[in-house]
Image (cartoon, coloured by chain):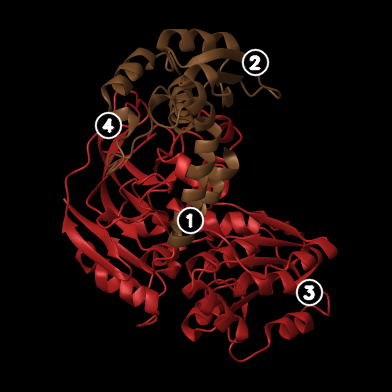
Amino acid sequence: MKANCWMGTRRVEVRTVPDPEILNPHDAIVRVTSTAICGSDVHLYDGFIPTMRKGDVLGHEFMGEVVEVGKAVTNLRRGDRVVVPFPIACGRCNMCRAQLFSLCENSNPNARQAEQLWGYSPCGIFGYSHMLGGYPGGQAQYVRVPFADVGPLRVPEELPDEKVLFLSDIFPTGYMAAEQSNIQPGSVVAVWGCGPVGQFAIASAYLLGAERVIAIDRFEYRMRIARERAGAETINYEETDVYEAIREMTGGRGADACIDAVGMEAHAANAWHIYDKVKTALSLETERGAAVRQAIMCCRSGGTVSIAGVYGGFMDKFPIGAIVNRSLTIKSGQTHVHRYMRPLLKRIVDGQIDPGFIITHRLPLDAAPDAYEMFTNKTDDCLKVVLAA
Amino acid sequence: MASEYSERGRADGLRWIGLGLAVGAAALAIRRFGGRRARNGDEAESSPPVSMAFTVHRAPDEVARLWTEIDPLRDIVEHVRFDAAPGDRGTELHVRFRPRWFGRRSPAQVQERLRQFKQLAETGEIARSGLGRGVREFGDMPEGALLEALVVGGAR
């Protein structure tokens, strides 16, 4: 089959690789119909995530048709149309039973490696480094889906791929970011980053009752979509002092909730950017933290900072003093996608949201290398690429 | 041991520093497991025992039965205990053994066996990515397959 493979920093290649096979009783094989490039794939592309190996199949946002099931999978059959959540979860361990699916204790074959870096291991993830399982990803014609009795969600035939594909990751991710921000009637929410997760965080904040959402970015095309499609007010951080602007827009209080939808490769229009660039280049820190630092400073006292962006290791100059002295709550986590798929599918079916609004490019799988380059460099007003496998 | 492992984990991003830490950890391991061996030549008898624990989400009597059936650490574990975990979280499986630096008796391998026992007991299968390149995954080894054959159906 054809698959998009990581070949080194800033290099991906569509190659012919062996078809996946059923290896475990709870496996299924899915023929991919649609798959997307995620902002977190850019961290792999840019070489920010360790334990990638040449030839790894990328992709963790995908859906398709079940073509084979293992002997212990009784809830799916050939021909079922499914969306697959990016975290691999067994459904039986203590974490899964507590609905904390991205912390599944049984799905990472390389848990030991993750424990060395993080203390304990989270779940395995499709196409996201060997430390997180080494599972081949979904930017391919076929994927092996472990614990297929727990993860894949059957979706109604009448809904096109574009409306349901993002249930695999970014819609639940934006939603969880908003849900854990303690949004109350009258809440003013600030969202760093108008990429796909930022757009869904904005939309979800409104679904959960926020009064106003302020979004921060520097690309006009992204801010335009945030304003016109998600309903946010926007701040261009290259033109405006974000702290002063949010302080003024909130009557001097600060934002009730601040959502970081940027993560480890943040860009800043000030000296922080140079500081982090130098330190990451020298391997003296692993994250560029400008967005989350600013989110903490802009949050009102007693407010919540919700981190949806991906971080992998160690950050310098993390403002712990602001958190402690102003009673801030920090919420974070890889998304427990399984928990959100059904309720969010219902919102789609009910017409409350059409997640397809973020798609700017539809390309064949063969175009993955160009698509990665375009998405990473934000050329051609690229916000989200969907690849047809 | 835990602090040695976490120190070495940072090596992924910082390879050279990591190499130094690995050398340091190895030196510690030699001191910890090797010192007495040099004196009397029988490390299994004389190295101080190490304890390890995993929580398995099944009842203590079920975990004990599976442990006896599978016997995943034959000749290695000196003592095993099955305690009810607080908060209705199943069973705390505690084992004690005398470690060696390498091989089946090393803390790393014993920990992996325990982890795989937990996976089998909870899900009936051992997690595998299908491409354990460089690292042979336990589930792909004959004994892994045998254990799965024993347990599938036993777990939910």
Question: What is the drawing colour of chain A?
Answer: red
Task: Name the mark nearer the viewer: 2 or 4.
Answer: 2
Disc 2: CA contacts within 10 A as few (<14), some (14-19) or many (>=20): some
- Which circle, 3 or 2, is nearer the viewer? 2
Q: Which mark is residue B20?
A: 1
SS for callout 3 = loop
Query: Mark 2 or mark 1: which comes first in sequence?
Result: 1
The residue under label 4 is which amino acid type?
Answer: Leu
Q: Quadrant of the C terminus of chain A?
A: bottom left
Q: How would you rate the neighbour count of disc 4 (Cα within 10 Å): few for under 14, some for 14-19, many for 20 or more?
A: many
Labels 3 and 2 positioned on one and the same chain: no
- Is residue B33 rendered to the left or right of residue A50? right
Q: Residue A6: x, y in percent?
A: 29, 61
Q: Are marks 3 and 4 on the same chain?
A: yes
User: Separation of disc 3 and disc 4 at Cα?
Assistant: 52 Å
Mark with earlier residue (3, 4) = 4
The reply to whether callout 2 and callout 4 are in contact (CB within 8 Å) is no
Q: CA distance from mark 2 to mark 4?
A: 33 Å
- In the picture of the structure, the residue carrying the numbered disc 4 is A23
Q: Residue B74 versus residue A49: which sits nearer the camera?
A: B74
**Residue A17, horizontal then vertical, whole percent:** 17, 50
Q: Residue at x 55, y 73 (%)?
A: A193
Q: Chain of mark 2?
A: B
The residue singled out by tag 2 in the image is B83
How busy is the neighbourhood of tag 3: few (under 14 within 10 Å), some, or many (20 plus)? many
- Under circle 1, the secondary element is helix
> Which kind of residue does numbered mark 2 sit on?
Asp
Tell me the colour chain B is drawn in. brown
Q: Which residue is mark 3?
A: A254
Q: Chain of mark 4?
A: A
Q: Is residue A247 above or below residue B15?
A: below
Q: Please, what is the three-letter code of the amino acid marked with disc 3?
A: Gly
